[in-house]
Image: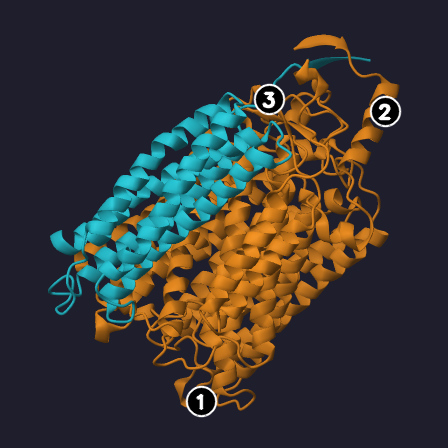
Amino acid sequence: MSVVAAPDRDGEAHDRAALALTWATPRGLRGWLSTANHKAVATRYVVSAFVFFALAGVLALIMRLQLAWPESRLIGPDLYNQIFTVHGSTMMFLFAVPVMEAMGIYLVPLMIGTRNVAFPRMNAFGYWTYLIGGGLLWIAFLLNVGPDTGWFSYVPLAGPAYAAGKRVDIWAQMITFTEIAALVAGVEIVVTTLKFRCPGMSLNRIPLLVWAMLVMALMVIFAMPAIMIASTMLAMDRLVDTHFFNPAEGGDVLLWQHLFWFFGHPEVYIIFVPATGFVSSLITAFARRPIFGYPAMVLALISTGFLGFGLWVHHMFATGLPQLGESFFTAASMMIAIPSGIQVFCWLATLRSGRIVVRAPLLFALGFIALFVLGGLTGVMVAAVPFDLQAHDTYFVVAHFHYVLVGGAVFPLLGAILFWLPKMTGRMPSESLGRWSFAVLFVGFNLTFFPMHRLGLAGMPRRVYTYLAQTGWAGGNLLASAGAGVMAVGVLLFAANIAWTPGRGTPAGADPWGADTLEWSVPSPPPAYNFVYLPVVESRTPLWTTPTPAVVTGLRTDVPEVLVTDAIDATPDHRHVLDGPSMWPLLTALASGIGVIVAIFTPWGVTLGAVLLLITLTGWFWPRGVPVSDTARERA
Amino acid sequence: MRRATLDVSALPSLVFGARAPIWWGVVGLLLIEGTALALVAAAYLYLRLNFEAWPPPGTPPPRLGAATADLVVLLASVLPMALVDRAARREARRPAWLALLVVIALGAVSLALRIPEFHALGCRWDSHAYGSVVWTTLGMHTAHVLTSTVENVLLAALLLAGPLERKHYVDVHVNALYWYFVAGTWTLVYALVFLGARWL
């Protein structure tokens, strides 16, 4: 590095204008459909995911309305089965995982100091694939062919013998779409994090949120193939008469459960780990100090990532497995409390030793700690086999996983949305609406889900569309239903705040919270190219320690060029030109969409999809126009 | 205003191996594909426990001829692909497509051998769970040989006739990585499907 006159004001204005031109997305519909900018794609992803969240939330309200009174005749069992299946499938596959990855796609490039994700067009392809999958599930549901065998679609119920029609096939193919999208985003986040960090941001300096995203993305890579294999086997059992899950011909229904939960348990951590990253960012910013115990936090994240793969059998304790296996998975399940405990301890220590500034996003993070500890405690309870056998398939489990998933992931996510909304829109959300929405949601959540512990212990099973008055479950159910109404008000308040912000919020400026990470050094909303000059980083909290950092010069501004650095130390390695906007990702997603949807009805859909994909991928890959990578400098 | 700057204009823009982002992208893809294959293998072994005899009575163990020939062909194809890889790193256009044509020819032979291989299984996918899992495993690997060969054809066409840019040599280079994976995993699929029916 050399100390020279930095680009003067004229030079900087010139570079800014050149970058704006180079990184611009074409105007109009075509530009909208072809953009490959990480912020545009991620924003769409987040908005779509929240639309699915709202839709699945409406289904939850319908269920709570049905269960508010015993022997209710509001909806029948068939529709109820579809509703809880579509609720769970939407929340897990169309909301929770996509929204976490989308936040990563938005934030990671900004937090590590680069201009876009590693493979911008693949990123756009992933989004379109996800959208087709979500559309498939919901259109089918509205046409009364929504899946009805639960979000984990257990065989034999979901097999050809007991689930006639196309409902389960819709579910299986929705899985195909969403898993492709999840895997694409996973690889994006891993490669972007490892290769595109700005100079100086060695692995021990990356923000904890980026660590969390990296661990989550690696978990996606190893977990998602299991559900793809499982759902493909299920689709084949149903469509071409294979016998994977058919005991009469040597198949095995437990094979489904093993494959499903080998994905399904890591899935919980895929959702939860990014949420812990949000909490770390929020607590750092509002405690006004670097996180306490950074190395311990990183190790906790990584060990959670590994342990998350050793727990899947605890979902199967009631299936009569060998006792030795049960003991092993009990121990593993309890072990995961250790890294979680370390994280909670470090957050509390950070808060205790910081100068706390209470803002609405921080309230969501604090609410998370309370709710997650409760969900974690019931988790340790159900990890014990004798207790699990009693609580299995009851509302106790429903209460447990809603505390973990809503308390442990949705609360931090909502806090994160409020926290980064000024960055995304350039405007501040309303603080009072933020606080009110937190308070109403927190009360509503506990009112809804705390009584479910009691209902479960009193024997109320999951997935029943009604119950008799003599069971004594009416009081708890009415309370839970009332709580659901309160939660809905909280969600509406939150949504109103989001809707109000872009038009009426006060201008935010670059760094409204006085936070520490690189995304706060660029204007709000960030320009398409993120940074005029990529920064050079010297600490974990760059904005607090080096307000005027050294900058990278010498990247081309006439083509979308970025700096690639070493995976460990982030020393500059080479210059790399990224792909710009293109229609091919959308066309390729449509091609695979046609193939997969036709395959619901005939195996020839696979052939059709393959041919269409060959055409679109060739179009995508085949170069056209002027080569940009052969610079005059290199030819010389 | 004086501010420290880090001038990167002298850095290269064409790199190979773990320095290149696309190399990491392909490694990510291989981890996904490898995990999927490992899970299918796990399903094969899991289903084995449900049977007294493997393959089940009435189904002969798969004949080895075509699959063994395929093993020789795919392992042999690694050598010309290594030459393609080396040529790409040297940005040598002609040697790259010449060797790639040899790989494509071997890939075509492997694909042709798939027909007798499926016949050699001696059962249908809907005969029993054994049939389901061997057809799926073999089918999955066949799909990989097919997609990888299509990719080889596209890259060969680009090297031969296309508007080639320097960055495409990195694509040719990482494509070799994918082919090694496809050829290498055949040893596992061969052992599982063709030898496993005799030894397990």
Residue A190 drawn at (x, y percent): 51, 38
Q: Which residue is mark 3?
A: A574
Against A457, residue A580 (above or below) is above
Q: Which residue is mark 1?
A: A469
Numbered badge on residue B127: none
Check chain identity for marks 3 and 1: say if they share one: yes
C-alpha distance separating marks 3 and 1: 71 Å
Chain B shown in which color? cyan
Pick whichever, A14 or A3, lies toward us: A14
- Where disc 1 sits, the SS reads helix
Chain A shown in which color? orange
- Where disc 3 sits, the SS reads strand
Can see residue A523? Answer: yes
Q: Quadrant of the N terminus of chain A?
A: top right
For residue A236, which quarter of the picture? bottom left
Q: Relative to A24, is A611 on the left or the right?
A: left
C-alpha distance separating marks 1 and 2: 75 Å
